[in-house]
Image (cartoon, helix red, strand yellow):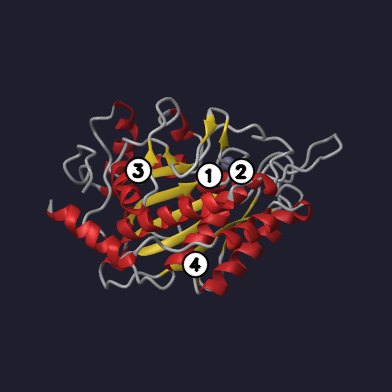
């Protein structure tokens, strides 16, 4: 009861973080433009996209995460384009609490897509929903909470190479810029623009993969209820899609990590018609505001997220968590909200 009252008081004071639909639209319009040729990994256009994201972080007042740079740079290693530079984009909102600022909440999305098709009238895989929408969400959240002084630090991360097998997120997990041991949660964002889910319209609510795998699902559902944007568990896809995006790379090393999505299946998925004009930006602004509220809640909470040991699919993540932390899973392991 006390926790609920406190949470309500907190949200009433803070309100739903404001995210502007036209800002999100501007980010998607650029990232999904033909000029960026589908943001293939690796490509000069993907580098251009990384520079756009870094410039937006700078405007908002987000610090570079890698020394004086926003870029975690490496070389693409396999197949087409081997030897070319690739980058994760890393921004930091430093926490305000002297102790908790050394703990981190990651907010992420992948900024690459499929590049260009070999033939056809329209060759460019614009990837507006997948995942320019998620990247716009990350920038939108950064903008909405930049002045909020969260206790923990928030890392804004956008990855290369997701479409080629979660390569950028796996590279980060192997070469973390901030200690994974102190990374308490990852909130990843994929496909938050399209509301025309193949199962029917999905407006005003947001899915979370692996909903009951950790306390993050129930905690975000509680925050979502407070701000009027339900966070839901898809009856069929919640568990299987847990492995389908960059959160999987973090979960594999033990960090409680999930992906927010509005529609899982939509008609233009991985097709050249995934265009910017098909996104619902007003809905996207509400969803992004809700994820911003979840980010602040976790960044300010007295307790850190923990894996749910009663969920049979989590044993490998708990094993990784215990290896990473050198101790048993945090909390009571029941997966109930802190
Ligand atoms: Zn994607």
Q: Quadrant of residue 310?
A: top left
Q: Earlier in the sequence, mark 4 or mark 1?
A: 4
Ligand 1 within 8 angstroms of badge 3 C-beta: no
- For residue 311, which numbered disc appears in the image? none
Mark 1 lies within 8 Å of ligand 1 (Cβ measured): yes
Query: Residue 225 at what x, y percent from top left?
Result: 32, 47
Q: Which element carries disc 4, helix, strand or loop? A: helix
Residue 196 in the image, given as x and y percentages of width and height: 58, 36
Closer to the eye: label 3 or 4 = 4
Point 74% across, 55% down: residue? 45
Mark 3 element type: loop
Q: How far separated are the C-alphas under marks 3 and 4? A: 29 Å
For disc 3, the marked residue is 254
The label number, if any, that marks residue 130 in the structure image: 2
Q: Are marks 3 and 4 in contact (CB under 8 Å)?
A: no
Q: Residues within 10 Å of mark 3 (few under 14, many from 20)?
A: many
The span from disc 3 to disc 2 (Cα, nearest Å) is 26 Å
Distance from Cα at disc 3 to Cα at disc 1: 21 Å
Question: Would you say the beta carbon of the disc 2 residue lies within 8 angstroms of ligand 1?
Answer: yes
Q: Is residue 310 visible?
A: yes
The answer to the question of whether label 1 and label 2 lie on touching residues, with beta carbons closer than 8 A, is yes
Read off the residue under disc 4. 143
The residue carrying mark 1 is 190
Q: Residue at x 46, y 48 (%)?
A: 188
């Amino acid at each position: 009861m006390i926790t609920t009252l406190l949470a309500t008081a907190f949200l009433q004071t803070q309100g739903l973080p404001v995210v502007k639909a036209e800002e999100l639209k501007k980010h998607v319009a650029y990232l999904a433009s033909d000029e960026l040729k589908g943001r293939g990994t690796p490509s000069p256009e993907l580098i251009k996209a990384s520079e756009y994201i870094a410039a937006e972080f700078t405007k908002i007042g987000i610090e570079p995460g890698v020394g004086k740079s926003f870029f975690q740079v490496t070389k693409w290693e396999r197949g087409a384009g081997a030897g070319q530079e690739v980058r994760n984009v890393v921004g930091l909102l430093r926490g305000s609490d002297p102790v908790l600022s050394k703990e981190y909440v990651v907010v992420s999305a992948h900024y690459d897509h499929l590049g260009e098709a070999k033939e056809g009238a329209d060759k460019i895989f614009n990837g507006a929903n997948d995942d320019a929408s998620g990247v716009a969400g990350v920038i939108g959240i950064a903008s909405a909470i930049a002045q909020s002084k969260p206790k923990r630090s928030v890392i804004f991360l956008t990855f290369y190479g997701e479409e080629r097998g979660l390569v950028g997120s796996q590279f980060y997990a192997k070469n973390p810029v901030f200690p994974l041991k102190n990374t308490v949660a990852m909130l990843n964002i994929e496909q938050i623009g399209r509301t025309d889910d193949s199962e029917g319209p999905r407006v005003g609510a947001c899915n979370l993969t692996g909903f009951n795998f950790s306390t993050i699902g129930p905690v975000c559902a509680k925050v979502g209820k407070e701000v009027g944007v339900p966070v839901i568990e898809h009856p069929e896809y919640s568990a299987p899609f847990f492995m389908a995006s960059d959160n999987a790379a973090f979960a594999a090393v033990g960090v409680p990590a999930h992906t927010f999505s509005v529609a899982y299946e939509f008609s233009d998925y991985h097709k050249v018609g995934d265009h910017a004009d098909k996104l619902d930006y007003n809905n996207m602004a509400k969803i992004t505001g809700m994820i911003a509220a979840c980010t602040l809640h976790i960044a300010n909470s007295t307790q850190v997220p923990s894996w749910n040991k009663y969920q049979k699919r989590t044993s490998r993540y708990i094993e990784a968590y215990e290896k990473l932390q050198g101790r048993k899973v945090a909390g009571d392991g029941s997966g109930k909200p802190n």
